[in-house]
Amino acid sequence: MIEDIYTEFKQLWRDEYIRYISAFCNTKGGVLYIGINDKGEIIGVDNAIFLLENLPNIINSKTGIMPMVELLEDDGKEYISIFVQSSVVPISYNGHYYTRSGSVTSELHGSHLNSFLLQKMGFSWESMIEDKFTIDDIDINAVAKFKSLAIERIPLINTENDTLKLIDRLQLITDNKFKKAAVLLFAKDTQRFYLQARIRIGKFLSASDIQTSDIIEGNIFEQVFKTLDVLKTKYLLSTISYEGIVRKETLEYPYEALREAILNAIIHREYFTTSEIQIRVFNDKLVILNEAKLPKEITVDNLKESHPSKPYNKLIAEIFYKAGLIESWGRGTQRIVEECEKANLPIPKFEYKDGTFYVIFFKRDSENVNVTVNVTENVTENVTENREILIIKLITDNEYITTSEIAKKLNVVRRTISRDIENLKAKGILTRVGIKGGYWKINKKGARE
C-alpha cells in the first residue's frame, strides 16, 4: 500500500490526526490506518481494542461525523482502519478546515477557505446579497449600454424601460435585494463596494522594474473596453500598412486574442479576494493573470482544444453572453490560440499555479518561447509557410508519428496540423496508409526538395 489522496498511514493514534479525517471528508473521502508506518508496512498497535471502542466517539465529538472504524489483522499484527466518506457540508477540526491533494493534507486559509466554504454550502460569491446596494446606485448608462449590446440575443430588450424589472429578469435580484453580480455589472461606482474589482496594467523593464502603470476602474463592462483602449494607445505598438489607399494598423498582439483573454479573466476571477487582475507588459511578452479556480474536469492542456464551458461566475458569464461579448460553450481560450496562429505568433502559454491563472502572449522573436522542434535549422517553427516543411521532416524521421505528436513538437494545436496534413495530401505530397496503426508515406514526386 502507498499513501495517496484516499489513504494515510500512522504508527500510533494522536487526537491531532483528526485533521486527516477532516481533510478526507472535505475532499473525496478516504481511510486513515493506525499501525502502519510511512513505508506502508504493517507494524501493528498494542491498544487496538481500546481504539476500536473509543475512536468513533472521539472523532464524533470533534467533527460531528461518525466514522467507520474496523479492527484488522495481518500476520498476527492488529491495526485499525478509520473510513469516512466525502461530506456535503464542510467539516472542521478545532475550527480549522483541511483538504487533501495527493498524499498531502493542507489547512485552508484566506480566499481558498472562503471559496471552499461557499462551494460546500452551494453558494457562489456573485450570487450573494449586497445589502448596501440600492436602485440609486445603478448606472443607467451602463444598463443602456447592455441593452444596446444584447439586442441580438434578447430581441425585445429595448421594450423594457423599467430598470428594476430588467435587472430582475437577468436573475440579479433575490428577495428585492441586489446580488453582488449586479454591483459588478451595473454600479455607478463599483470600487466603492469592491475596491479589488479592477484591472492594473504595468509596463515592466524586468520582473521587478516597472516603468509605468495604470488602474482601470468602473463596472466590469466598462473595464473590458477601457483596458483594450489603454493597451492599444499607451502600451502596445502597431505596424502600419496600406491596402490600396486604406491605412491598416496591426497591433503587435492580436486585438481579438487580447479581448478574449481579458474577458476570461473578468468572468473567471475570484472577486472575494483582495487581488486585482494584472496585465504585465514586457519587451518580449504580455502576461494577464488573475486569481481563479480551474474546474477539476479541466486541465491547462485542455484549454487549447475543445473543452466544456465551466464559468466560475455563472451569472456574470450569462450576462456577458447575452451582451454578445462571449460564446456560451467555452471557446475563449481556443480563440486566443487561433488568433495568435493567424498572426503567425507563437502559441500563448496557459499556466495555473498557486490559485492564479496566467495567459502569456509571446512576440515572434521572443527568447522565452519553449522551442520543442529541432528538425531543421534557421527555420522559424511557428511561421505558417514553413510548417509543412517541418511536418515532412518529422514524418521522414518517424513514419508512424501521430498528428497529436506533431502538434506537440511544433507547439500548435492538433486542429492546425490536421489542416496542414490535408493540404499536403491534396498536393499529392503525403499519403496515409492504413488507419489505426497505419503510417505516413511521402510521395517523392510531390515532395518539396
Image (cartoon, rainbow, N blue to C red):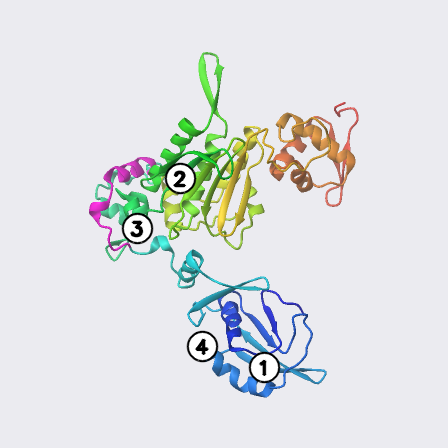
**The C terminus sits in image quarter:** top right
Marks 3 and 1: in contact by CB < 8 Å?
no
Amino acid on which the number 2 mark rests in the picture: Arg
Where is residue 238? Give x, y as percent.
Answer: 47, 23
- Is residue 346 in sight in this rendering? yes
Closest to the camera, between mark 2 and mark 3, is 2
Sooner in the amino-acid sequence: mark 2 or mark 3: 3
Q: Are marks 4 and 3 in contact (CB under 8 Å)?
A: no
Q: Left or right of 63: which side holds 373?
A: right
Q: Mark 2 near mark 4, Cβ–Cβ under 8 Å?
A: no
Kindly identify which residue carries mark 2: 200
Q: Earlier in the sequence, mark 2 or mark 4?
A: 4
Say which of marks 1 and 2 sits in front: 2
Q: Which mark is residue 172?
A: 3
In the rendered structure, find residue 70 and report the number of the disc placed on it: 1
Q: Which of marks 4 and 1 precedes in the sequence?
A: 4
Magenta portion: prevailing SS class: helix
Q: In the rendered view, would you say 47 is above or below 240?
A: below
User: What is the x, y in percent for residue 183?
Assistant: 29, 47
Q: Position of residue 149 (x, y in %)?
A: 33, 36
Does the magenta portion include 231?
no
- Give the farthest residue toward the top: 245
* Residue 12 picture quarter: bottom right
Spatial separation of the CA atoms under disc 2 and disc 4: 44 Å
- Which quadrant would the N terminus be assigned to in this image? bottom right
Q: Residues within 10 Å of mark 2 (few under 14, many from 20)?
A: some
Mark number displayed over residue 62: 4
Q: How far is the residue under mark 1 from the one under mark 3? A: 50 Å
Q: Residues within 10 Å of mark 4 (few under 14, many from 20)?
A: some
Asked whether the beta carbons under mark 2 and mark 3 sit within 8 Å of each other, the answer is no
Callout 1: 10 Å neighbours few (<14), some, many (20+)? some
